[in-house]
Amino acid sequence: MAKYEKLIRATLLSCTMLSVMITVMVVASVFSETMRFFSNVSVFNFFFGTEWSPQTAIRPDQAGGSGTFGAVPVFLGTFLVTLIAMAVAAPLGLFSAIYLSVYASPRFRLWAKPVLEILAGVPSVVYGYFAVITMAPMLREFGETIGLSIASESALTAGTVMGIMITPYVMSISEDVISAVPKSLSMGSLAIGATESETVKKVILPAALPGIVSALLLGVSRGVGETMVVVMAAGMAANLTINPLESVTTATVQIMTLLVGDHEFDSDKTRAAFALGFSLFIMTLILNIVALIIVKKYRERYD
Amino acid sequence: MIKLFERRTRITVQRIKKKKSPFIYKSYSKKPKHTWLKKRKAAERRFRNAGLISILIAFLFLVSLVCNIVSSGYSAFTGTQIKLPITFQTELVEKGAYRKIVQNALLDLFQDVETRKEKRSLFMLISRNAPYELKSLIKQKPDLIGTKIDLWLPAASATSIFYKQRLLEESKRIGKINGDQAKWVTTLAQSQRTRLKFNMPFFKNGDSREAEQAGILASTIGSFFTILVCVLLAFPLGVATAIYLEEFAPRNWVTSIIEININNLAAVPSIIFGLLGLSIYLNFFGMPRSSSLVGGLVLALLILPVIVISTRNALHSVPQSIRDAAAALGATPTQVVFHHTLIYALPGVMTGVILGIARAFGETAPLLMIGMVAFIADAPQTITDPATTLPIQVFLWTNNPELGFVEKTAAAIMVLLGFMILINLCAVYVRKRFEIKW
Amino acid sequence: MSAKQTAIESSNMENNQPLDIRMKTRDLSVFYDDKQALFDVNLDIYKNRVTALIGPSGCGKSTFMRCLNRMNDYVDGCRITGKVRLDGFNIYKDNVDTILLRQKVGMVFQKPNPFPKSIFENVAYGPKIHKLTSSKDELEELVMKSLKRVGLWDEVSDRLSSPGTSLSGGQQQRLCIARAIATEPEVVLMDEPCSALDPIATARIEELIAELEQQYTIVIITHSMQQAERVSDYTAFFHLGKIIESGDTSKIFNDPEHQKTKDYIGGKFG
Ligand SMILES: Nc1ncnc2c1ncn2[C@@H]1O[C@H](COP(=O)(O)OP(=O)(O)O)[C@@H](O)[C@H]1O
Ligand SMILES: [Mg+2]
C-alpha cells in the first residue's frame, strides 16, 4: 500500500520536475545561443546599430560581406506595428467592453461576448490571409483615392489587421475587469443623479484602471510576439522609418526569415535570430509580470 | 436599433393631468443650470454611441472576415469538368503518349485551330493531370484500347475559375485566360460539354503545383499526427504536474517559483518555442526535420501551461469537504486524489485540454521554424515523415500568386475554421454535460 | 441658494395638494420579469417626517424604495405599473428627467459604498456633476457643511484627502449620507443604513436622522423594531409585497389592527 503511495507521488513529482525542466530549457537554449551571438557581435552594436543586413555574402568580394546586426530598425518596426495595432484595439476593445457591461441588455451580452471571442480564437494565419487578400488591396485603393501611396506590405496593413485580432482579447479582459467593480459603487453614483457615462468615467474606470492597464499590456505583449500576420503582411526589408505607409519589418519576421529553410546552423546569421528571440522573450516577460503585479495589487485593494 | 441591444425598463403608467413638473427637463431649458444638464445629456449620448459603434465595428470585422472567406472559398468545393471525345489509338497508348490523346481530342473539337500558339492555348484548357487519369483508366479497363468514347476530364484551374465566374469578357484579373480560350470555353459550355462536379481532389489529394489538383488531405493528416504527439505528451505531463502542484506540493518558495515559471510560459510568444525546437530537437537531438514528431513536441510545450493552469483551476474548485470526507473514510492522499478529486474535476480538465488542442491546431509560426513548410504531395505515413499542417497549407497557398490557389486557400480556411468550431463545440458540450456544480 | 429656489418652485406648484404629503404611491405594482414583487401599494410619505418601512426580508421593501427615485430603471427585467407622485407629479411620466429626480431624491445604501476617492472628492462628487456651486470656495463650503451636518467634520477635517475607504464602517456610512445630502436633496431614502454597523455607530446615525428630519423628508428601511420605533413618525408594514398596515408609529407598535403586524412586531416571524 505505502509502496504504491510512494511510487505515485514520485511519478507526479518527476512529471513536475520535467515540466519545470522544460521551462528552464526553453530559456536556457535561447539564452545560450544568444550569448554565443554576443561573443561575436557587440551588444552595443546590436541594440544601438541602425543598419540591419544579416545576410552574409557567399563570395568575400560581395558588399556587406560580414553582415551587419544593428537591430534598431527591427525593434522600431515592431514598435510601430504594435502601436498601430493598439491604436485600433485599445479604443475598440475598451468601448465595446464598456458598452457590453454598462449599456447592453443581459441577453445581448450573453451571446455577444462569446461571439466576439470567436474572433480571438481564429488562428492568426487566417488573419494573415485576410491582410494579404483583403486589407492590403483595400488600403492601397483607399490611399490612391486620397492621394497617398501605401506600400503593399505596409506597417499600416499589418498593424490594422493585428489590431482587429487583438480587439476581442482586450475587450474580453476589460469586460471582466469592469464587471468586477462592485455594483454598489456604480449604484451609489447613479443614485445621486450621475448619468451612466459620468459613472463610468468618474467611478468605474478609475476603480478598474489597474485592470484595464494590464489588459492593454497583455494586448501589447500579444502584438509584440505575434508572427503570422506580420510575416504575411509586413515587409522583410529593415527600413528605419516611423512612416506607417511604408514597409517595415519586425523581430518576429526577421526570426522567421533568418531561420526558415536554413539548414546551416552555426553562423552569426542564425544566432542573430536567437538574439532577437531572446529580446522578444524578455520584453513579453516584463510586460506580463508588470500586468500581473498590477492585477494582484488591484485585487488586494478590492477584497 | 438601440432598443434591440439596450436594457430598458418598461414603464406603463397612466398619464396624469398636464402640469409642469420640476423634473421635466424641457421646461427648464432656458435657465443656465439646464444648459449644463443639456451638455451632460449630450455627453451621455456621445459616450453611449461610441460604445455602440465600437461593438458594431467589432461585429463588422467578424462578418466581413467570414463573408470574405466564404464568398471566395465556396467555389473551390466544385471543380469544372469538360467532356472530350477521346480516341484511344493503340500506338499512342503503347507509347504512353496520353497527353497526345487528350490533345487530339481537343483538336477534334476545334478543327479550325492551326497555329502553334493557338494550339498551345487550346491545350491549356485541360488540366495537366488529365493524361494521368486516362492512364489509370486504361490500366483498369484495357479493353478500351482502340475505341472512341466521350469522357469527362478535369479542366485546368484558370479555365475552371473562368467558367465558374462566367467572366465572359477578357478579364484583367485572369492573366492566364485569353480571348480565344474564353471563346472556346463558351462554345464548350453551349454544346453541353462542361459541368460542375463536387471537387473530390480537394479532399483526397495532397499539395500540388496544379491548383485544380491541390488538396488538403496530406496537411490534414499531418495536423492530426502532430496533435496526436502533442496531446500524448502534454496531457499526462500537464495533468500530473497540476495534480502535484495543487494537491501535494508543500507551500514554500520553491513551489511558488515553479508556479510563476509555468504561468509565464503561457505568455511566451509561440515563435520562441520554434527557436527551442530548432536548437534542441533538431540541432541537439538530431530529430527528423519537418516531421510531425518534432512539430508535436514543440506544440506540447506550447499547450503544457494551458493544461496545467486549467487542471489546477478544476482541481481547486472541488470543495475541501470532499477531500476531508474521503480521507475520513481512511483513503490515502493519493486515493483521495485519484478516486475523488481528479474524477470530479475531470470535466474541467477535459475542457482545458480541448481548448489547448484548439490552440495547437491553429498554431503556425513555430512549426514553420522547424521546417514543416515543405511541399508535401503525399500524406505522411508515420510521425517521422516530413509533414505539414492545415494552417501551414493555408500559409503556403496564400503566398502562391496563381489565381487558382486563392479559392483553395479560402476553402482550406473554411475547413480549418470548421475544425476549430467543432473542437470548441466539444469543449462546450463537455462542460455543459458533465460539469459538476458545487 | 438653488435648494431654496427649487423649494420655492415646488411649493408654488403644490397649491392643490395637501401641503404635508411629499410623495405618494397609488396602485404601485412591480414585476421582475414575470414575478410580481409588489401588489398595488398605496402609501403617503409626509414632509419633514421620518417614514419607516418594516417587514420580513424579501417582502419588497427595497423594491418599493427603489421605485421612489427610479433606481429600478437599472434593474434588468423590472417593470412598473401604477403611479408614484412627488409633489403631485408622476415621476414615471416619459418626460421626467431621472437625473434631476435623483438629485432631489437621494439614496443611502445598506452597505457603505464610498467611492475609491478622497473623502473630499466623495462629498464633492454630486455638487460637481450637477454644477451646484460656481466656485471652488463655494464647493469647499458645501462639502464642509455636509460633513458637519453628519457630524464627520471634526473627525476628518485634517485628512480630507485620504481615501474614503480608509474610514471605519460607521464613518463610511456617514460619509455616504454626507455625499447624498451634498446634492441638496429634498427626500432622503435609506435602505437599512445601520445593518452593517456596530451599536455605537448605529446610535450615531439615529441621532443624525433625528437632526436631518428638520430639513428633509426621510424614508428608512430597518429590520430593528426598536430602531423604527425610536426614529420614525410613520411606519408601513410590508408583507409578501403588500402593505398590511401603515400609520403613526406609535399606533402601529402599540395598537396594531392586524394580527400579522402584531405577530411580526412581537417577533413571531421575520
Ligand atoms: N433584481 C431582481 N431580480 C429579480 N427579483 C428580484 C430582484 N430584486 C428583488 N427581487 C425579488 O423581489 C422580492 C422583494 O425583494 P426586496 O425588495 O429586495 O425585499 P426586501 O428588501 O424587503 O428584503 C424578493 O422576492 C426578491 O427575490
Ligand atoms: Mg432589502
Image (cartoon, coloured by chain):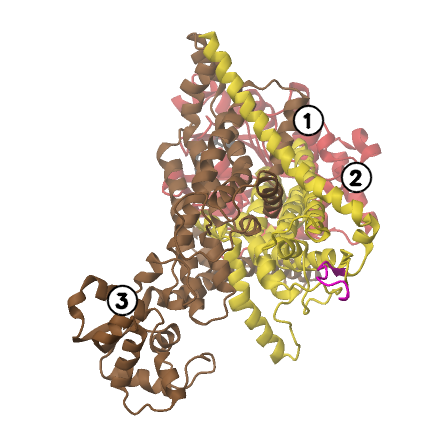
Q: Which residue position holds label 2?
A: C144
**Mark seen at residue B135:** 3
Q: Distance between the residues labelled 3 and 1?
A: 93 Å
- Label 1 neighbour load within 10 Å: few <14, some 14-19, many 20+: many
Judged left or right of residue C151, residue C81 is left
Marks 3/2 in contact by CB < 8 Å: the verdict is: no
Residue at (33, 62) in percent of width and height: B201
Marks 3/1 in contact by CB < 8 Å: the verdict is: no
**Mark seen at residue C170:** 1
Q: Which image quadrant: the C terminus of chain B?
A: top left
Q: What residue type is labelled 2?
A: Met
- Label 2 neighbour load within 10 Å: few <14, some 14-19, many 20+: some
Q: Mark 3 lies on which chain?
A: B
Of circles 3 and 2, the one toward us is 3
- Residue C110 in view here: yes
Instruction: Tell me which numbered mark, 1 or 2, is placed earlier along the sequence.
Output: 2
Depth order, front residue of B370/B268 = B370
Stretch of the chain drawn in magenta:
A52-63
Of circles 3 and 1, the one toward us is 3
- Say which chain is brown: B
Q: How far apart are marks 1 and 2 (CA)?
A: 18 Å
Chain A pictured colour: yellow
Of circles 1 and 2, the one toward us is 1
Q: Does the residue labelled 1 lie within 8 Å of ligand 2?
A: no
Q: Which chain carries label 1?
A: C
* Residue C118 x/y as whole percent: 75, 39
Q: Is mark 3 on a helix, strand or loop?
A: helix
Q: Which chain carries label 2?
A: C
